[in-house]
């Protein structure tokens, strides 16, 4: 009986883990899972009878254990088919020892993200995105050879189900190092393959509105949201940590909103002949109108889309309010009523947008 994958990685990194994977060798996984369910008073859930994958949901309804047999009942073959070296370490619970066949500990020690075999990416191209999702979670550097491999296969990211891409993308935006992951995704051509609208975003150069190219400004806005979260007071942090829709924190959705807040700019981009000044009239409204189609294709829920569209539509609103002559409580309260429970998020986005333009 071996613990494998994420639980070992999280243990080594000092992170909490609620999702344990167990491999059972030389014994039927279903029989073992039923026996363990009885021992732990857990709920038994068959996930995949054909591949013998079973889940135990523990009494707290938060922790769960997935149990299976190894591929071809061969532990080495099973571990060799995984994505990253750090996710292919096992711990033998009987012999009380680690099994690391592919240098996972070495990569953890040197804060490196590496794959086991190139063919594993081709067999399941979602792993192309998972590379960057784990970078967003850990802040680790991606091996340079691995970047070249991603550049070779980036178009395969269109093959997996959109629901799976959605999950990995939200995990990426929920990570502490989202900015680093976005920069590397862009370098490896994966970013625009998942979100093609950013092909147009990348055409807008620095101008009087922001000193960075628009793609850089969009990523910098995410950085500023992260910076604000780190210094926010307890009440604001609790608000951003709440999971109110989509299965992920508000913070993850706010960072995605920050990344997308200027997607409407290219469509309304004009340059004044006499001054050379760049104009983006009503870009916030255009971006909000574009947002639902983009996110629908990636299988975002109605509530997620409503939130992100609203953030895009009103990201300049707080700046307009504070510029109001004779700003009154009435004007402030009208704004709060309009934004309702999203008012904190909207103010943070507006501040981050302005800070990103400096």
Image: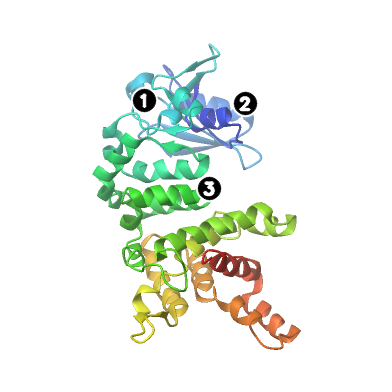
The location of residue 243, given as percent across then percent down, is 61, 56
**Crowding near the residue tagged with mark 2, few <14, some 14–19, many ≥20 C-alpha atoms within 10 Å:** few
Give the residue at mark 1. Answer: 78
**Percent of width and height locating residue 90:** 47, 22
Q: State the separation of the CA atoms marked 1 and 2.
A: 27 Å
Q: Nearer the viewer, residue 291 or 243?
A: 291
Task: Give the CA separation, mark 1 to mark 3.
Answer: 28 Å
For discs 1 and 2, the disc positioned in front in the rendered view: 1
User: Is residue 254 left or right of 340 when viewed as pictured?
Assistant: left
Q: Nearer the viewer, mark 2 or mark 3?
A: 3
Q: Position of residue 158 (x, y in %)?
A: 28, 52
Looking at the rendered structure, the secondary structure element under dot 3 is: loop
The answer to which of 83 and 205 lies nearer the viewer is: 205
Q: Residue at x 52, y 58 (%)?
A: 222
Quarter that holds the C terminus: bottom right
Where residue 38 appears, x then y in whole percent? Answer: 60, 28
Query: Which residue is pictured at 43% across the width and 51% down the height?
Result: 182
**Pointer 2 residue:** 39
Q: Residues within 10 Å of mark 3 (few under 14, many from 20)?
A: many
Nearest the viewer among 31 and 74 is: 74
Please say which color scheme the image uses: rainbow
Could you tell me which secondary element the residue under label 2 belongs to?
helix
- Residue at the farthest front position: 274
Circles 1 and 3, Cβ within 8 Å, touching? The answer is no
Query: Which residue position is annotated with label 3?
Result: 175
Quarter of the rendering containing residue 82 = top left
As drawn, the label of residue 33 is none
- Give 206 or 340, whichever is nearer the viewer: 206
Furthest residue toward top: 95
Q: CA distance from mark 2 to mark 3?
A: 35 Å
Labels 1 and 2: the sequence-earlier one: 2
């Amino acid at each position: 009986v071996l613990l494998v994958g994420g639980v070992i990685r999280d243990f080594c990194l000092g992170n909490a883990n609620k999702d344990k994977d167990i491999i059972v060798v030389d014994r039927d996984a279903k029989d073992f899972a039923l026996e363990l369910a009885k021992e732990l008073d857990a709920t038994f859930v068959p996930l995949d009878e054909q591949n013998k994958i079973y889940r135990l949901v523990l009494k707290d309804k938060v922790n769960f254990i997935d149990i299976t047999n190894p591929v071809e009942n061969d532990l080495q073959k099973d571990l060799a088919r995984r994505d990253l070296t750090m996710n292919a370490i096992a711990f033998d619970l009987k012999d009380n020892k680690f099994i690391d066949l592919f240098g996972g500990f070495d990569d953890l020690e040197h804060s490196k993200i590496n794959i086991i075999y190139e063919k594993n990416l081709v067999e399941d191209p979602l792993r192309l995105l998972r590379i960057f999702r784990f970078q967003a979670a850990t802040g680790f550097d991606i091996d340079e050879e691995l970047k070249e491999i991603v550049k070779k296969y980036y178009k395969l990211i269109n093959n997996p189900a959109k629901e799976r891409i959605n999950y990995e993308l939200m995990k990426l935006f929920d990570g502490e190092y989202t900015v680093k992951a976005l920069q590397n995704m862009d370098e490896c051509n994966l970013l625009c393959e998942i979100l093609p609208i950013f092909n147009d975003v990348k055409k807008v150069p620095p101008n009087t509105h922001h000193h960075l190219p628009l793609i850089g400004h969009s990523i910098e806005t995410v950085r500023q949201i992260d910076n604000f979260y780190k210094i926010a007071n307890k009440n604001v942090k609790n608000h951003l940590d709440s999971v109110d829709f989509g299965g992920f924190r508000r913070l993850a959705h706010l960072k995605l909103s920050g990344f997308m807040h200027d997607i409407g700019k290219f469509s309304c981009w004009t340059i004044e002949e006499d001054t050379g000044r760049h104009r983006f009239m009503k870009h916030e409204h255009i971006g909000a109108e574009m947002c639902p189609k983009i996110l629908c294709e990636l299988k975002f829920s109605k509530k997620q889309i409503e939130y992100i569209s609203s953030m895009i539509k009103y990201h300049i609103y707080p700046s307009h309010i504070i510029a109001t002559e004779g700003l009154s409580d009435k004007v402030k309260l009208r704004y709060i009523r309009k934004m309702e429970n999203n008012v904190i998020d909207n103010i943070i986005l507006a501040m981050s947008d302005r800070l990103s333009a400096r």
